[in-house]
């Protein structure tokens, strides 16, 4: 390995700048290969080299382009900077013969059907589901599982494309509308409850770090109806703290991730916990900022450090951990640049500065104090800033 290793970073969208900044701080050279549509959005010198590619969907051409770059460069590792680059990174990784998440493993993390089947074989509880492509299987499912249901794209990111179906009269037209894209969807039991997420670091087949959070309103409801997105660490005595750490470890094992970052989501109803999905990437919506402010762990930096440890064949240890409660609030705003100056409580440790967005991270050693401030600031953001856009019509097919 070179003294200053070269990491290839892939980004279909304008995401992952923090990893590139952290790489520079660690003395790691980076080459960013990103989509042509992001030209002009990246900061100057964000990476040692930047190349733009017109079509991340043309994977054969992308592999050829990377192989051409590799003629005069030695890539030591490959990082996908967003959800839509996870499978592409795995393909390029295999093409170059590098260690890490391979194509099959990456596909399990991207395909909700294969993901559900894998964790189901490991015995994890989850909502009942069926692949949407077989008529009889769908009819049997609808007869056995009471509505409502969720019709979910198998490979889109987050809540994108998810449709709530209230009954059989809605289901048939929805499936008909999908046409030959039905095979890229699954139908799932709609279980209502508290939605939680676990953000983890995995090294040597072991979970080295995990933090449990609970969303406020369900992310799907936010994507459909708008609102202030919130998530916060759960109270120390909350049963989710211990139970979800165990379920999270079992899910990661079932999905065969040996090293990397995982953002996994679970649902709690009446004291029971269900697996929803997992992604082999850092969680979006500035969750990484919340994790760092409460625990001291920068997920992007630690992802880089783990790869460096793997290259050097050394053990990995997390930095010294903090133990503070924290909450994240963010929303779309009516104002181009909302004024957050009056959100000045001692608990505020970070503010988002982004066009038509407002965002805060709150931190406190006391759970009750944090929750009171979260409720207050959520109400104020709804009154002063919140803009609600009509939900975009879901696309079909794979990303």
Image (spheres, rainbow, N blue to C red):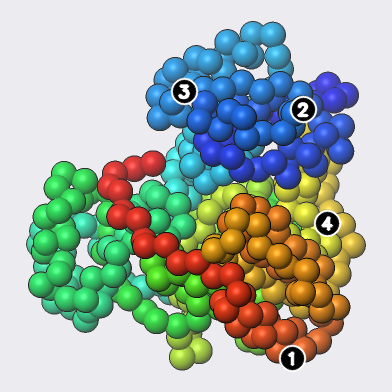
User: Where is 78 relative to 358, above or below?
Assistant: above
- Which residue is label 1 attached to? 368
Q: Earlier in the sequence, mark 4 or mark 1?
A: 4
Task: Find out whether the residues at labels 1 and 2 contact each other: C-beta distance under 8 Å.
Answer: no
Residue 134 visible at all? no
- Which residue is label 4 attached to? 318
Of 14 and 59, nearer the camera is 14
Q: Earlier in the sequence, mark 1 or mark 2?
A: 2
Corner quadrant of residue 98:
top right
Q: Position of residue 374 (x, y in %)?
A: 68, 81
- Which residue is label 2 attached to? 45
Q: Earlier in the sequence, mark 3 or mark 1?
A: 3
Label 2 element class: loop
Corner quadrant of residue 1:
top right
Mark 1 neighbour density, 10 Å: few (under 14) some (14–19) many (20 or more)? few
Residue 150 visible at all? yes
CA distance separating discs 3 and 1: 50 Å
Q: Earlier in the sequence, mark 3 or mark 4?
A: 3
Of 329 and 204, nearer the camera is 329
CA distance separating discs 3 and 4: 38 Å
Corner quadrant of residue 311:
top right
Q: Position of residue 41 (x, y in %)?
A: 62, 35
């Amino acid at each position: 390995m070179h003294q200053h290793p070269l990491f290839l970073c892939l980004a279909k969208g304008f995401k992952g700048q923090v990893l590139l900044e952290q790489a520079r701080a660690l003395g790691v050279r980076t080459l960013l290969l990103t989509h042509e549509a992001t030209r002009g959005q990246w900061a100057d010198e964000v990476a040692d080299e930047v190349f733009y590619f017109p079509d991340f969907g043309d994977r054969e051409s992308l592999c050829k382009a990377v192989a051409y770059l590799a003629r005069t460069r030695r890539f030591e590792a490959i990082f996908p900077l967003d959800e839509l680059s996870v499978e592409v990174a795995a393909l390029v990784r295999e093409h170059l013969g590098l260690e890490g998440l391979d194509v099959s493993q990456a596909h399990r993390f991207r395909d909700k059907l294969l993901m559900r089947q894998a964790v189901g074989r490991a015995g994890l509880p989850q909502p009942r589901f069926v692949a949407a492509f077989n008529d009889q299987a769908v009819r049997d499912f609808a007869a056995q599982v009471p509505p409502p249901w969720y019709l979910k794209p198998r490979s889109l990111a987050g809540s994108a494309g998810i449709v709530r179906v209230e009954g059989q009269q809605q289901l048939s037209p929805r499936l008909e509308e999908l046409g030959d894209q039905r095979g890229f969807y699954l139908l799932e039991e709609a279980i209502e409850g508290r939605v939680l997420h676990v953000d983890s670091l995995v090294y040597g087949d072991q979970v080295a770090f995990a933090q449990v959070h609970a969303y406020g309103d369900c992310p799907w409801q936010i994507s459909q109806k708008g609102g202030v997105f919130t998530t916060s660490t759960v109270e120390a005595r909350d049963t989710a703290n211990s139970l979800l750490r165990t379920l999270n470890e079992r899910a990661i094992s079932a999905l065969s991730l040996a090293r990397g970052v995982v953002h996994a989501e679970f649902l709690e109803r009446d004291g029971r916990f269900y697996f929803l999905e997992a992604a082999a990437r850092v969680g979006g919506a500035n969750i990484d900022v919340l994790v760092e402010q409460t625990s001291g762990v920068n997920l992007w930096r630690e992802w880089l450090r783990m790869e460096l440890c793997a290259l050097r064949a050394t053990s990995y240890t997390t930095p010294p951990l903090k133990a503070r409660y924290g909450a994240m609030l963010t929303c779309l705003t009516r104002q181009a640049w909302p004024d957050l100056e009056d959100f000045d409580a001692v608990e505020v440790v970070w503010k988002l500065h982004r066009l038509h967005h407002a965002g805060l991270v709150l931190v406190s050693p006391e759970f009750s104090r944090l929750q009171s401030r979260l409720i207050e600031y959520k109400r104020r953001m709804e009154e002063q800033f919140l803009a609600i856009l009509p939900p975009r019509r879901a696309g079909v097919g794979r990303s």
